[in-house]
Amino acid sequence: MLGTGATESIIAEDGKVTLKKYRKHRRRLKKLKREFRQSITHLENLHGSCINHLRPVTEPLALISQIQRSGGSLLSQLCDGHPQLHAHPHELKIGYPDKYTWPQIDLDDHPKHWFETLFESNVINHFKNGYKKQKNMDETFLFLFLPSVQRDLFLNYIDSVSSKSLRDVFNAYMTSYFSAWLNNQNTSGDKKFITAFTARLAMDKDNVESFFKIYPDGRLISIIRDPKNWYPSAVRHKPLDYEDIRKALDLWVKSARSMLWNKERFGDRVCVIRFEDLIGKTESVMRYLAAFLKIEFDDILLIPTFNCSIIQANTSFDTHESGIIKSTLARHKMLTNNEIEIIDEMTNDIYYAVSRAF
């Protein structure tokens, strides 16, 4: 009440030091309280910071795709952390109207509708509850991702493009996705490709045609798994979808046949590997894929990770192991004699044809 000068004139020197410290502390508390009340301003600052420090992601997509339970998630996790790759951390779900259908974008439509079509809503759950590959897994990873920031980044990026092409729309989406992923640990490096896994997308000719129309410089990687090892894993993972063994094998055959068609149609842009080689000869396969993508081989390609952290194996069977699980090569031991006969009858010819072709 007396003011600084009057107060200091009536107290001792020791008291002046104490009073100075108190005033400094009080000014600091007032500043902090004002700052703590600025939650909306902070979010606005975050939006602005992300936009101002935007790093365009315009590299081609290396799509991993085939029927489920064939090693797509594993290969995607092996690519995670490589300094020359933008690795999508989960199954890529830009498909519309379902994840198995490559999205069709109308350039005459409004950009906000493009974003709504491509947006992967699972990021909302991963942001709120943490990332885990399967619901029954104990292992959960921090995933800082703001959908509102992604939308703003997408719209700002696409607005900066004068003559918009379909590729520009997908570049805008990938740029917004990786820029809105705030705790992404793999942002530096000379990137060559975006890697991502989507089940079944490559089983449809129209999907693959659309994919290469957008990404003529893209790559398609498909994994074929011995049907005798595949079926026990598939039926364990989703019994209702795969309990009818003949219907399940029809899907497996469709996936295998698509690999032959895709390779014939798109040649050197398509790569097919055997699941059993990925598990049993991991380094040889990953060196081959590094050469296929024209990236340098790095030991990180031998370790399944999420955002550069080692991740638990994605398997239909109970395990807390991480890394490459060799027991996946012995799933055939679970089959009955009748199941073996049916699998041989329905798949031997096409499995031999694909194995011989690649």
Image: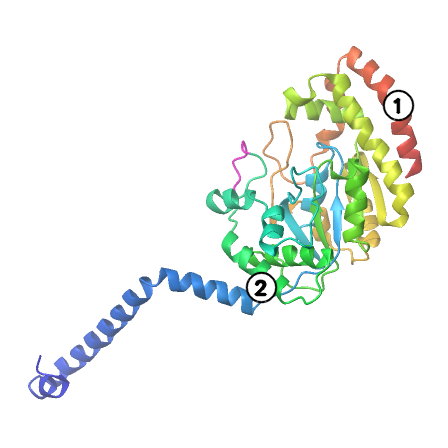
Q: Residues within 10 Å of mark 2 (few under 14, many from 20)?
A: some
Residue 127 colored magenta? no
Question: Magenta: predominant secondary structure element?
Answer: loop
Classify mark 2: helix, strand or loop: helix
When asked about the image quadrant of residue 72, the answer is: top right
Residue 151 left/right relative to 101: left
When asked about the image quadrant of residue 167, the answer is: bottom right
Q: Callout 1, which amino acid?
A: Asn
Q: Can I make out residue 121 in this image?
A: yes
Q: Callout 2, which amino acid?
A: Asn
Query: Where's residue 17, x and y in %?
Result: 18, 81
Q: Residues within 10 Å of mark 1 (few under 14, many from 20)?
A: some
Considering depth in this image, is 109 or 238 the residue closer to the camera? 109
Q: Taking 216 as reference, is 70 above or below it?
A: above
Please provide the residue range marked out in magenta: 135-140
Question: In which quadrant is the N terminus drawn?
Answer: bottom left
Residue 138 colored magenta? yes
When asked about the image quadrant of residue 204, the answer is: top right
- Mark earlier in primary sequence (1, 2): 2
Considering depth in this image, is 181 or 275 the residue closer to the camera? 181
User: Which residue carries the number 1 mark?
Assistant: 348
Contact check, label 1 and label 2, Cβ < 8 Å: no
For residue 37, which numbered disc appears in the image?
none
At 58% across and 34% down in the image, what residue appears? 320
- Which residue of the protein is positioned furthest toward the left in this rendering? 10
Question: In which quadrant is the C terminus drawn?
Answer: top right
At 82% across and 15% down in the image, what residue appears? 342
Q: Taking 193 as reference, is 69 above or below it?
A: above
For residue 156, which numbered disc appears in the image?
2
